[in-house]
Image (spheres, rainbow, N blue to C red):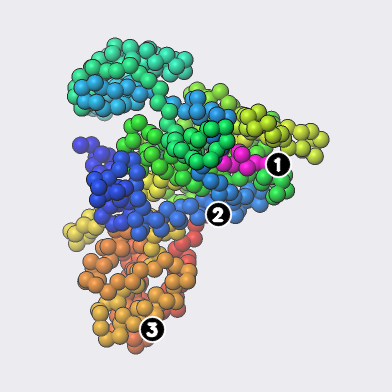
Amino acid sequence: MSNNEDKFKKIIAHAKEYGFVFQSSEIYDGLAAAYDYGQYGVELKNNIKEYWWKSMVQYHENIVGLDAAIFMHPTTWKASGHVDAFNDPMIDNKDSKKRYRADVLVEDHIEKIQLKIQKDVEKARKRFGDDFDEVQFLTTNQRIIDRQNEIEDIKKRLYTAMEENRLDDIRELIEDLGIVCPVSGSRNWTDVRQFNLMFSTEMGSLSEGANKIYLRPETAQGIFVNYLNIQKTGRMKIPFGIAQIGKAFRNEIVARQFIFRMREFEQMEMQFFVRPGQEIKWFEYWKEQRMNWHLNMGIPETEYRFHEHDKLAHYANAAFDIEFNFPMGFKELEGIHSRTDFDLGAHQKFSGKKIQYFDPEINESYVPYVVETSIGLDRTFLAVLTFAFNEEKLEDGSERVVMRIPPFLAPIKAAILPLVKKDGLPEKAMEIFDTLKDDYMCFYEEKDSIGKRYRRQDAIGTPYCITVDHQTLEDNTVTIRERDSMQQDRIGIEQIHEIIKNRLKHKS
Ligand code: GAP
């Protein structure tokens, strides 16, 4: 097991053990790709949502919020292109009866070749020692060049077949590469078929006998179909934005990697409506703003990178992802897309309603262009867990797991702990709890030794532990212990509020 796989397993186990994330319906052996957020998970999730909402809605005079229904008129998904084109190519192995995403099988094969290249590099590094020049080796070693060419050929075949929807070619590629089913080890594959990712269900009383409706696969369409409502009732002037946080559903074929790829998940999306021709300026603006939002959490810059889309969707004229260094490597966390007038134009066409904006500055009407920022809440949660999880060896030889969650996002801000369960200490501790609870999520506990209680708070990322002892009764002072440094100070009770407040400060 690689270090990263090992770390991922530990994070998943920790998230369960400490009440962050549970498998859905666990007592019935679980439901794949659905997860429940426990007592600390829900607090962290709410704090991430609040951070996003404040920075997008509250701090922008020209962005407003929306909470649209999950169910939408089925024509919405015709107009958006999801009924016809929101597909993944899938293939079944006849022996194991397991289903795979055909493109992912090929991509996994490519990754294996890449691993071989890495191994060759490591071997050469050992052989040549200090004289080793990696760039020269990669560009001149024939075996490496052959492998890189092989990767390029495979990619070309895969992406052309995907783009032109030639499913037989994808199957042929899988056969040519000799890809076997990871479970049965056989090459006994079915044909490749397209698989629509939308969940559908029945609704009683739709017109024209149509009763099939979909669970929304993205929140964005709720924003597009409400564009006119909000622009008119909010008297919004372009440029302006509409933001929304909500559930989305996708019947992912390969749902693995914990809360990274789920069938029910949450998105935080913002559509920014602009004058045609100004979209690239706004795209650049949002690209920078969104990266700053991530960095302002206090997670280092090295954990993020931009990834420019090689091939743009037909309606987009610019697209970047923000990737995060998850335990399984750099993967998409957020997308920033310039979507032109594709969506509003399509809804105008399918609904027959005029969706136009009269721009008094240029005396013209037009269908606004859209710059979208779309981030997965669950993936942000996983990014925070990945950054926060730390196993530490302490000076005295003992070990601790500490979740270095950015303090303003921590589920619990302060734990109030009476040293012993008698002599009036619990009552005094509850008094302190009551003075803080209006402003901060606090935790009260009197069981177990103080050392064990500190460790439990470290494990859920609580920035401060406040211990009430006999001296507290005499002079109204407590011990305050800081999570990361484990430093303990004696302070007056009246200082607690201010100390916590200062620690929670962050840029927005
Ligand atoms: N409206 C644009 C849109 O939905 P997307 O790239 O398909 O774009 C946006 O999704 C974000 O939603 C992704 O960057 C990711 O963070 C999150 N996301 C997408 N599918 C997901 C899944 N199955 N599980 C968890 N998060 C997902």
As drawn, the label of residue 54 is: 2
Q: Which residue is mark 3?
A: 476
Tell me which secondary structure the magenta stretch mostly adopts. Answer: helix
Question: Is 474 rendered above or below residue 95?
Answer: below
x, y percent for residue 413? 40, 64
The reply to whether discs 1 and 2 touch (Cβ–Cβ < 8 Å) is: no
As drawn, the label of residue 305 is: none
In-front residue for pair 320/341: 341
In-front residue for pair 354/175: 354
Quadrant of the rendered structure where residue 346 is? top right
Label 3 SS = loop
| Label 2 crowd bin: few (<14), some (14–19), many (20+), radius 10 Å | few
Question: Is 479 rendered above or below residue 51?
Answer: below
Q: Which residues are magenta?
A: 221-228
Taking the spot 56% from the left edge, 46% from the top edge, the residue there is: 68
Taking the spot 46% from the left edge, 38% from the top edge, the residue there is: 202
Taking the spot 30% from the left edge, 82% from the top edge, the residue there is: 425
Between discs 1 and 2, the one toward the N terminus: 2
In-front residue for pair 391/432: 432
Reply yes or no: does residue 403 show up in magenta: no
Question: Is 429 rendered above or below residue 307?
Answer: below
Mark 2: amino acid = Lys
State the separation of the CA atoms marked 1 and 2.
21 Å
Quadrant of the rendered structure where residue 465 is? bottom left
| Label 3 crowd bin: few (<14), some (14–19), many (20+), radius 10 Å | some
Q: Which residue is mark 1?
A: 238
The reply to whether discs 2 and 3 touch (Cβ–Cβ < 8 Å) is: no
In-front residue for pair 26/2: 26
Mark 3: amino acid = Asn
Label 2 SS = helix
Q: Is residue 70 left or right of residue 348?
A: left
